[in-house]
Amino acid sequence: MESATFVLFGATGDLAKRKIYPALFQLFVEQQLPSSFSVIGLGRRELSHEAFQSNVAQSLLTFSRSEMKDSVVMEQFLNAFRYHVLDVNRREDYTKLLSLVEDREVELNITPNRMFYLSVGPEFFETIATNIHESGLGSARGWKRLVIEKPFGHNLESARQLNQTLNQAFEESEIYRIDHYLGKPMVQQMGQLLQSALTEHDLRTRTIASVQISAIETLGVEERAGYYDHAGALRDMFQNHMLQLLMMLTIEFPKPSSAAEGVKRKSQIIKSLMPLNKRKVSQHVVRGQYGAGMIKEKPVIRYTDEAGIASDSQNDTFIAARLQVDDSFWKNTPIYIRTGKRLKEKATRIVIEFKSEGPLKDLLIIEIGPQEGIYYLKRQSNHELSEDETSLRSQPNLMNKGVDGKDAYETLIHDALLGNKAYFAHWNEVELSWEWVQPIMDAYQENLIPLHVYPAGSYGPQEASDLLERDGFHWWFDKKQTSVNDVTKGELFTYEYTN
Ligand SMILES: NC(=O)c1ccc[n+]([C@@H]2O[C@H](COP(=O)([O-])OP(=O)(O)OC[C@H]3O[C@@H](n4cnc5c(N)ncnc54)[C@H](OP(=O)(O)O)[C@@H]3O)[C@@H](O)[C@H]2O)c1
């Protein structure tokens, strides 16, 4: 790997402490960083290099998964770190930063390859990219790369605007958009695992009856009220993570001839999604918001009573949708997606249901989190799963080699340093995803679709189940609803809406 400087904006923030430093340290311990490596941390607060290094050390002691926390290894790692005070809006700070970066490049005798990692709010992305360009930080003889995290805009127009500005400083090939779902080992190995599971069980891919993709969680809005109340489940999860999972799965059928072809096919998949008309969105989409309820036997308040949320907020904390990929392979296979907060359990899972001659439907289950695995369930009875079947861990896990607990940030930072863009979101995918969800955002905005309030601790509004039942399917692996709180009749909680 080529030597490089890792310039980290937001070096005093939460993401840096919890994810970025532990990931860099893990790569260092595994000798997967360049032998000469320089890290320059940036933030507004005044810190000496030593104080910064000691903060990084503290975050490693708290969050690193590495066993190697002995002082010699840590010290070698921390030696690479320097700190610089920078306010993203102050142009002169970038000039001083350039001097520091160059001094370190000379001192360490490294090529001026620079990776700019923006671990700051998205409102700063454009300012930083422009200042990197204008200060000359981005015009050294080596490569330059920009790493950013979602959200990439809050709608199609703002995403285009953001991209245009970024493109004045960085080419598309230099922009690495992190969607951390793409860094999950299970998602990266999905294609290969699926193909071997299908071969092993002699399943023809043409016999897929339906696909379900769920990413559900028990947490509520927590500390993120300010951001979340403007984003909702649609922008926070659906437009990016959920559509990425859909792309990653569907590109595997039929098997792409190469990894590069697979990446190209991702955009084609989004392009072939049947477009929605905002007036008909309610036929395909269920919008929900959590009410009060019980999570793990503890009472929890409704969304509109959460701190920082307006009492009349119409924001969505749940979405379920029926999608159709209109290409020759997927034409007749419905794909159901749901994601939401304050639901009965935490799970990220894909279930592929196969057609069968008789009533028994075999299932292929891909568990992405909290645990990872791929299971083939040969069904004994159709509707109700036996206890043995619902406990997936009693089934053979077809993922024969462990994924060694790698964190998504380790894989993604390593790939970005190598210049491997396979598991980053390309602009085409981002733009097409925003285009596809725009009618849903319009329907929400114009109140053309009801907002169903569901009890916390359920699986969302009943209407999310009705969406599948209309086609003769049901959500697999939902635990039985047992208490009064689990009653999920959406109509009871429906807000007024116009149609
Ligand atoms: N935390 C997570 O788990 C997580 C997960 C995924 C994505 N993200 C995204 O990652 C980004 C950072 O999140 P975070 O949780 O780390 O936020 P955070 O804890 O609030 O940290 C923000 C960082 O930005 C710096 N900053 C703020 N204003 C600045 C300015 N004007 N000039 C220079 N630096 C400035 C802060 O440093 P000073 O205060 O020293 O200036 C701090 O280092 C956000 O966009 C977030 O959406 C976070």
Image (cartoon, rainbow, N blue to C red):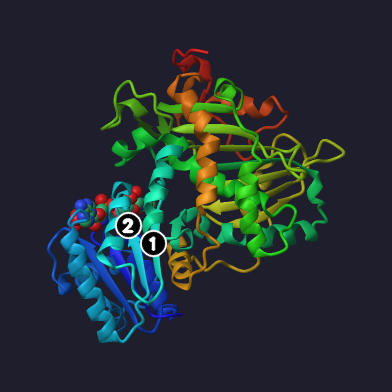
Q: How many marks?
A: 2
Q: Which three-letter amino acid code belongs to the residue tagged 2?
A: Ala
Q: Is residue 147 above or below residue 110?
A: above
- The disc at residue 129 is 2
Mark 2 secondary-structure assignment: helix
Judging depth in this view, the residue of 30 and 497 nearest the camera is 497
**Res. 391 in view:** no
Which x, y percent locates residue 455? 45, 26
Q: Residue at x 61, y 51 (%)?
A: 266
Disc 1 from disc 2: Cα separation:
8 Å
Q: Residue at x 52, y 54 (%)?
A: 426
Q: Residue at x 36, y 73 (%)?
A: 25
| Crowd rating for badge 2 (residues with CA inside 10 Å; few <14, some 14–19, many 20+) | many
Which x, y percent locates residue 97? 21, 69
Q: Residue at x 20, y 74 (%)?
A: 99
Q: Is residue 90 above or below residue 341?
A: below
Q: Is residue 442 left or right of residue 280?
A: left
**For residue 50, what is the image quadrant?**
bottom left
Label 1 vs 2, first from the N-terminus: 2
- Residue corresponding to mark 1: 146
Q: Is residue 81 above or below residue 433?
A: below
C-beta proximity under 8 Å, tags 1 and 2: yes
- The disc at residue 1 is none
Which x, y percent locates residue 497? 47, 14
